[in-house]
Amino acid sequence: MTEETLATAAPSGPPELSDADIYEAMKEIPGYLDITPGSFKEVYRLAFRLARKRLFEEVTAAHLMTREVIAVRPETPVEEVAQAMGRAGISGVPVVDGENRVVGVISERDFLQRMGAKEGNFMSLVALCLKTRGCVAVPIKEKRAADLMSAPAVTVAPDTPLREILQLFDTRHINRVPVADAAGRLQGIITRGDLIRVLGGLK
Amino acid sequence: MSRLSEYFRKMAGTSISPPGVDLQEMLVSGLGGFVGIGLLALLESHLVAGTDLVLLIGSFGASAVLVYGAVKSPLAQPRNVLGGHLLSALVGVSAVKLLGPHTWLTPALAVGLSLILMHATRTLHPPGGATALIAVMGGPKIQQLGYLYVLLPVGAGAVLLLAVALLFNNLIPRRRYPEFWW
């Protein structure tokens, strides 16, 4: 990832400290500190950047992922897939085969697109429903997960660093990515929410 | 044109002075300086008075400011105090031996080379510049010492100032010394 896309994917600089903040902090440390607030700020800025860079390499998919994943099988009827997603309040699930290998991902977008919403988002479906008479889920009835899922699934390995995961979310426009081991078996899932939580903690 | 204005803009400064210290810090610093320099002066008057030797030189006043007044400063740590004084003394005496004390070049080289050497060895200690200068301009009594100047007064004095700094600063609850040894 270039520095530029990294900057858009995450806070690029430290929260700005004022000279006055630093001055007040220095006053709380007894004894004479022979550094100006300006020099301190320079060190802080650079150290923050280095720490962020280091954390983006050190924090991996294994740290970020949720281990309890709701997944469906390729032969699961889409109605059941939708029910499972609705109950859990999630917008996407991995599809795994009999050996727990990730073969695809189904998200809201896959449903919406198959139901006629061209842009694949909820409001375009609402618009469609308002324009036509009633809402027609007919095209996808009787289908199974395998018919709707995006495949092959984009997955990451447990040791994939945060930096690469952010890049993946950015360039592939995805909202979640399953974590799979070398054999492709599902280990966990990382959502945008997980990334927001960890980046919030990095601030 | 913009390069010229940039040049002058740099002279305006960009930051603010660090905060001043409270009364306790002032008094403790003053007491430290009093004890450290007092010890050297006392030893000077009892042990070396009447001999050709010297113990107290001007640059120790500057070292006292750092080791008793700015104890957290990297410049005030043992490595810097000892290294800065010893190396600068060595440079100062060598400059006199090579060029004699009476050219303008001798003090300039003594201080300039001391600075380079202190930086190169991570022993920057501002009083070292004075120690180098005193080797050149300290008069016949100092010049007579030759390389002995490096050990006495410079080495011995620096060690004593450090010993007092170690004992004195750590008696003060809010102080600790040093930040690092080497």
Image (cartoon, coloured by chain):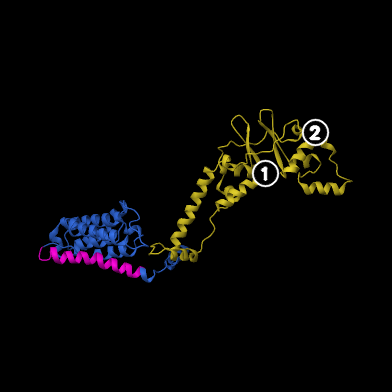
Chain colours: A yellow, B blue
Instruction: From the viewer's side, name the closer residue of B176 and A134.
Output: B176
Q: What amino acid is at disc 2?
A: Lys
Q: How dense is the environment of label 2, judged by Cα within 10 Å: few (below 14), some, or many (20 and up)?
A: some
Q: Which residue lies furthest to the right in this view?
A: A133
- For residue B41, which quarter of the picture? bottom left
Where in the figure is residue A99, as x and y percent of width and height?
66, 28
Name the residue tied to disc 1.
Answer: A175
Labels 2 and 1: the sequence-earlier one = 2
Q: Is residue B87 above or below residue A98?
A: below
Q: Which mark is residue A143?
A: 2
Which element type, helix, strand or loop, lies under badge 2?
Answer: loop
Total numbered badges shown on the rendered structure:
2
Q: What amino acid is at disc 1?
A: Asn
Which element type, helix, strand or loop, lies under badge 1?
Answer: loop
> Which residue does the image show at 10% across and 66% down from the upper left?
B50
The magenta stretch spans residue B38: yes
- Classified by dominant secondary structure, the portion drawn in magenta counts as helix
Q: Which chain carries label 1?
A: A
Q: Is residue B110 above or below residue A79?
A: below
> Which residue does the image show at 36% across and 62% down from the upper left?
B173
Where in the figure is residue B75, as x and y percent of width and height?
33, 58
Q: Are marks 2 and 1 on the same chain?
A: yes
Where in the figure is residue A171, as x and y percent of width and height?
64, 43
**Span shown in magenta:** B25-51
